[in-house]
Image (cartoon, rainbow, N blue to C red):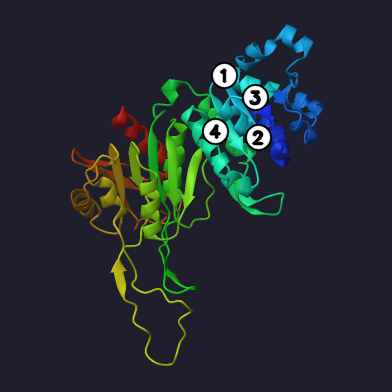
């Protein structure tokens, strides 16, 4: 990658300290960083620290005679390949959404002709406030990209969405944005990826689930995002972190997973990797079921909704390409062909989970089953399967 330049706007919030680590990561990767430090941001990090790590001057004043003579806010706003706002506070988002230009940061955002990436950070109530959500929708409609926020504990002592994404995640999102169009063939495309198991409650303590780790689905979501795709990852319970640049929606049951997928429509691509429970208990116990000394209680099951078949059904919201997964222990290709016909999807990625190291492991052995026939791949790392599959899907959507 040729030398790239970032214009880094540091907003005022506790998360501003993470901008220092982000700057270090970018410089280590050979990316130039030119910082703009807001007056609020200067309450949390010093200009000296930012300048030392960026190896460049820190800009802060809109009406600085020297800066205006040397650079000017117009030139400054166009001096980089990408404008990054870290942290993107509720105030900065509101100013950008409404076109306010009362300081150097907001003026730069209004004057720039370069793409903008924001990493929001604020209290959970501020993030969920209708005004912030309206501003978010406006900025997205204007083409602004976002990374995060995450859900977690905050400096204020509350818990929920609003925690800024970690510097390493923001770094990966930036590097993805800096790639040329040839390296981002899915730019402008939207994808839904399901991953992990589902958990169907029997009572407040017990549930039905399976051994899926979610690794393959997460790897596919990451590979699609790396090609420029806007990815919504609908995930069952896993121990995995959300990939950089991917919006994760966490669910537990099959019905919740279906609802999340439908809420993410329209999309160009749907990849159903999740190991969804075929059945769920007909009746969920309100209290823990106790042993009584008699015969074990009967567990009556009912069928779960079919997510792959629902997304594959003809209609205005059907994605152009729908890919399903089939985890089988025997007669893998035969079952995959039958599933392809039954579900109405475009491809089935059949994986033989009887092979040691596949279920819950880091490797996979797959075959791509479509109307054109069967394409068999050798056993390889799930990350390599994801990369190869993402490239194949990009070609199909070209």
Horizontal side of residue 302 vs 334, given as left or right:
right
Q: Residue at x 76, y 29 (%)?
A: 39
Q: Secondary structure at mark 3?
A: helix
Q: Earlier in the sequence, mark 1 or mark 2?
A: 1
Q: Is residue 84 left or right of residue 363?
A: right
To which residue does mark 4 refer? 173
CA distance for labels 3 and 2: 10 Å
| Residue 236, label in figure | none
How many residues crowd mark 4 within 10 Å: few (<14), some (14–19), many (20+)? many
Res 211 visible: yes
Location of residue 341 in the rendering, given as x and y in whole percent from the top left corner: 18, 49
**Residue found 72% across the figure and 49% down from its top:** 155
| Along the line of sight, the residue nearer the viewer: 18 or 395 | 18
x, y percentage for residue 9? 67, 27
Please give the label number shown on residue 91. 2
Q: Which residue is mark 1?
A: 81
Quarter location, residue 148: top right
Q: Residues within 10 Å of mark 1 (few under 14, many from 20)?
A: some
**Residue at image point 45% right, 46% down:** 218
Residue 368, image x, y percentages = 27, 43
Residue 104 position within the rendered picture, expressed as x and y whole percent measured from the top left = 69, 21
Which label lies toward us, 3 or 1?
3
Quarter where residue 282 is shown = bottom left
Residue ID for mark 3: 106
**Secondary structure of the residue carrying numbered label 2:** helix
């Amino acid at each position: 990658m040729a030398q790239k330049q970032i214009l880094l706007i540091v907003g005022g919030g506790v998360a501003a300290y993470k901008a220092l680590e982000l700057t270090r990561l970018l410089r280590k990767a050979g990316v130039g960083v030119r910082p703009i430090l807001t007056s609020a941001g200067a309450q949390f990090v010093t200009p000296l620290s930012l300048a030392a790590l960026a190896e460049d001057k820190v800009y802060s004043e809109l009406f600085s005679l020297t800066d205006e003579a040397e650079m000017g806010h117009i030139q400054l706003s166009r001096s980089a390949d990408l404008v990054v706002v870290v942290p993107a506070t509720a105030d900065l988002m509101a100013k950008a959404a409404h076109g306010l230009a009362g300081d150097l940061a907001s003026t730069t955002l209004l004057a720039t002709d370069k793409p903008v990436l924001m990493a929001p950070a604020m209290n959970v109530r501020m993030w969920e406030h209708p005004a912030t959500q309206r501003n978010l929708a406006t900025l997205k409609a204007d083409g602004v990209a976002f990374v995060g926020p995450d859900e977690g504990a905050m400096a204020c002592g509350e818990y929920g969405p609003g925690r800024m994404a970690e510097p390493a995640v923001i770094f990966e999102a930036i590097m993805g944005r800096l790639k040329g169009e040839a390296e981002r063939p899915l730019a402008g495309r939207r994808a839904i990826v399901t991953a992990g198991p589902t958990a169907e409650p029997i009572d407040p303590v017990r549930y039905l689930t399976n051994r899926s780790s979610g690794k393959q689905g997460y790897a596919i979501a990451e590979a699609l995002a790396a090609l420029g795709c806007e990815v919504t990852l609908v995930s069952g319970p896993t121990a995995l972190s959300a990939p950089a640049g991917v919006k994760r929606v966490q669910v537990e049951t099959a019905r919740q997973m279906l609802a999340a997928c439908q809420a993410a429509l329209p999309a160009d691509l749907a990849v159903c990797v999740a190991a969804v429970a075929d059945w769920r208990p007909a009746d969920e116990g309100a209290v823990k079921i106790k042993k009584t000394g008699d015969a074990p209680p009967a567990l009556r099951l009912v069928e779960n909704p079919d997510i792959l078949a629902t997304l594959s059904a003809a209609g205005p919201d059907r994605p152009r390409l729908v890919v399903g997964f089939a985890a089988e222990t025997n007669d893998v290709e035969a079952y995959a062909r039958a599933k392809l016909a039954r579900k109405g999807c475009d491809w089935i990625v059949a994986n033989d989970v009887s092979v040691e190291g596949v279920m819950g492991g880091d490797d996979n052995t797959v075959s791509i089953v479509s109307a054109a026939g069967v394409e068999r791949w050798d056993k390889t790392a799930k990350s390599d399967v994801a990369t190869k599959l993402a490239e194949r899907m990009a070609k199909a959507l070209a």
